[in-house]
């Protein structure tokens, strides 16, 4: 572990700059989902418990360097107060005198960092300004760690720095999944397009023992093998890329699991007439919308033998019944094996979290990341600037 945690820091009497992700969904001026707020509560609690004053830095929406009133963090303040069970001091125009004027046990929320164009440009001047507001820097926003911004990367070089509890949990989970995993390791990669996940697939075939391909991506893999997938979503122009990935998998002794049977329909709509056919028997006027029961048996059998599971993307068109069947069945079995202590299960990505929630499995996984792009880039083997800055910090 190359980065410090809150356990390594003396926070007593210090103003603690804390980068958090509270970029939550809002409708009619009210927060509709407080998950991201709830996940930062342990960090805030520990800072207060160690005698520090948390000064929260966060972005909200995409104001693109301009002041956009509806993207003010004032909108999030009431939900933050509700979750914390205490008052939060909002500071629109921060400076050290304003920060120091607050009580020691205050929780301070600074206005949207992205209201300044200097934030996303990682301008050294803004990093210096942010550093002037605190004595210690804590990054608890893994979800923004793939961005080299002033509040995620620049300031980490200017103050004693560490990971917050959420960042720490995320990094431990991901390192356990791919850096030092218990083997065998199974990865599920699903979703619509191979073209958006080439780097991910290329990295995983070198890291895992079994790679399960699902969703529209599986159609592209089948088509690359000369199988007629009818009207299914598939990227036929990706044939050479898919062949390369399969060659790399062979060289790395990574088994690729593709559907052997599929659920097909002529319309993508709830309750559409559907049937299960062999993967190479899709009617020309139909589309593949889910993996079939035999395919699910093979996936679950891989789980039974595995010690670690990494999941990114659904196995089918899970948003509409009955095309959520394969995803639900696989997710529930993974959850059961996790609860039984037989499997470490790590999942992430927007559709993945949604699919696992629908299956009632998310809470039973070892770790479910809400980080989206940062989670994906980590799985791709990329260096995340926000994490690298912590590793280099004194």
Image (tube, rainbow, N blue to C red):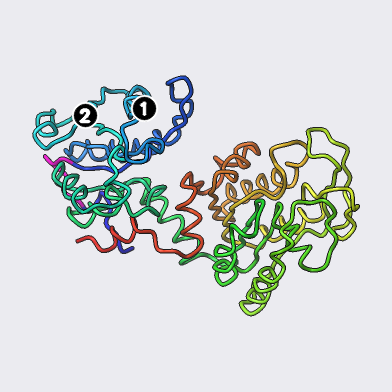
Would residue 265 be found to the left or right of residue 73 on screen?
right
Q: Which residue is depicted at the point 18% across and 50% down?
A: 125
Residue picked out by circle 1: 76
Q: Residue furthest bottom?
A: 251
Q: Position of residue 354 (x, y in %)?
A: 59, 39
Q: Is residue 344 magenta?
A: no
Of the pair 139 and 105, the residue shown nearer to us: 139
Q: Regarding mark 1 in the picture, which secondary structure is present there?
A: loop
- Mark 2, Cα crowd under 10 Å, few <14 / some 14-19 / many 20+, is some
Q: Position of residue 29 (x, y in %)?
A: 42, 21
Give the Cα separation between the discs numbered 1 and 2.
Answer: 13 Å
Residue picked out by circle 2: 91
Q: Which stretch appears magenta?
A: 9-15
* Predominant secondary structure, magenta span: loop
Query: Which mark sits nearer the N-terminus, 1 or 2?
Result: 1
Of the pair 2 and 384, the residue shown nearer to us: 384
Q: Position of residue 250 (x, y in %)?
A: 67, 77
| Tally of numbered tags | 2
Q: Position of residue 386 (x, y in %)?
A: 33, 55
Q: Which residue is depicted at the point 22% across and 48% down?
A: 137
Q: Which residue is depicted at the point 30% across and 37% down?
A: 115
Q: Which residue is depicted at the point 16% across and 43% down?
A: 134
- Snapshot quadrant of residue 20: top left
- Snapshot quadrant of residue 92: top left
Would residue 155 be found to the left or right of residue 65 on screen?
left
- Mark 1, Cα crowd under 10 Å, few <14 / some 14-19 / many 20+, is many
Of the pair 261 and 57, the residue shown nearer to us: 57
- In the rendered image, the vertical position of residue 29 relative to residue 258, given as above or below: above
């Amino acid at each position: 572990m190359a980065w410090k945690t809150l356990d390594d820091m003396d926070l007593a009497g210090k103003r603690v700059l804390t980068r958090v992700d509270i970029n939550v969904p809002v409708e009619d001026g009210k927060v509709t989902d407080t998950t991201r707020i709830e996940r930062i509560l342990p960090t805030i609690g520990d800072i207060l418990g160690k005698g520090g004053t948390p000064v929260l830095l966060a972005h909200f929406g995409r104001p693109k360097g301009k002041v956009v009133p509806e993207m003010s963090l004032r909108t999030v303040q009431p939900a933050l107060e509700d979750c914390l069970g205490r008052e939060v001091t909002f500071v629109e125009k921060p400076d050290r005198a304003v920060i120091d004027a607050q009580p020691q046990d205050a929780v301070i929320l600074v206005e949207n960092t992205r209201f300044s164009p200097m934030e996303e440009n990682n301008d050294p001047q803004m990093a210096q300004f942010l550093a002037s507001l605190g004595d210690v820097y804590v990054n608890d926003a893994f979800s923004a760690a793939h961005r080299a911004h002033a509040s995620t990367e620049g300031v980490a070089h200017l103050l004693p720095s560490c990971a917050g509890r959420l960042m720490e949990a995320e990094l431990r989970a991901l390192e356990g999944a791919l850096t030092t995993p218990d083997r065998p390791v199974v990865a599920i990669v699903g979703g619509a397009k191979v073209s958006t996940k080439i780097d991910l697939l290329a990295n995983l075939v070198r890291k895992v023992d079994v790679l399960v391909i699902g969703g529209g991506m599986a159609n592209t893999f089948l088509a690359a093998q000369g199988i007629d997938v009818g009207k299914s979503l598939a990227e036929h122009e990706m044939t050479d890329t898919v062949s390369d990935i399969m060659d790399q998998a062979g060289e790395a002794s990574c088994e690729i699991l593709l559907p052997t049977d599929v659920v097909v329909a002529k319309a993508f709509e709830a309750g559409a007439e559907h049937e299960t056919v062999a993967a190479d028997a899709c009617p020309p006027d139909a589309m593949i919308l889910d993996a079939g029961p035999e395919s699910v048996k093979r996936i679950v059998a891989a789980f039974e033998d595995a010690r670690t599971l990494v999941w990114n993307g659904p196995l089918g068109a899970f948003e509409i019944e009955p095309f959520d069947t394969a995803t639900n069945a696989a997710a529930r079995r993974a959850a059961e094996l996790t609860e039984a202590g037989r499997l470490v299960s790590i999942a992430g990505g927007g559709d993945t979290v949604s699919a696992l929630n629908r299956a009632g499995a998310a809470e039973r996984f070892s770790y479910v990341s809400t980080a989206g792009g940062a989670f994906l880039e980590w799985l791709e083997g990329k260096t995340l600037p926000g994490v690298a800055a912590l590793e280099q910090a004194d």
